[in-house]
Amino acid sequence: MHESVDPLHGVTLQSMLDSLVAWYGWEELGRQVDIRCFTHEPSIASSLKFLRRTPWAREKVEALYRQTLRPDAAKSRQSA
């Protein structure tokens, strides 16, 4: 059996968002991906609703999630 190379394989949007919020916090997440659902009264529920309807915003969140999962990014975050 071969494993998927895509870091998003099997990751739900909610789990991705939960991880990003835990990693960055809402304020920094709103700076990284400047969308209103992250910068004005953010919540997981409102963000999921928006991201599910808005492909360009979801793509930005997925790109940030992929970037955050890079081994060098994780190492630099842990040493900070």
Image: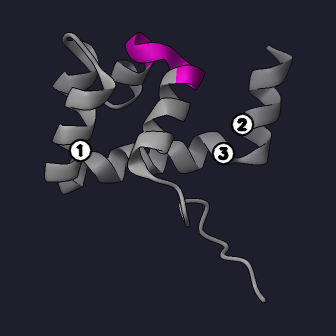
Name which residue lies at 38% across and 43% down.
Answer: 61
User: Residue 68 at what x, y percent from top left?
Assistant: 61, 39
Q: Is residue 47 above or below residue 71?
A: above
Q: Where does the magenta region start and end?
A: 22-28
Q: Amino acid at mark 2?
A: Ala
| Disc sitting over residue 69 in the figure | 3
Quadrant where the C terminus sits is top right
Give yes or no for contact between labels 3 and 2 (Cβ–Cβ under 8 Å). Answer: yes
Q: Nearer the viewer, mark 1 or mark 3?
A: 1
| Disc sitting over residue 73 in the figure | 2
| Disc sitting over residue 51 in the figure | 1
In front of the other: 49 or 72: 49
User: Residue 18 at what x, y percent from top left?
Assistant: 48, 31
How many angstroms separate mark 1 from mark 3 (CA)? 20 Å
Q: Secondary structure at mark 2?
A: helix
In screen coordinates, is 4 left or right of 62?
right
Q: Residues within 10 Å of mark 2 (few under 14, many from 20)?
A: few
Within the magenta stretch, is there residue 43?
Answer: no
In screen coordinates, is 62 left or right of 30?
right
Name which residue lies at 79% across and 27% down.
Answer: 76
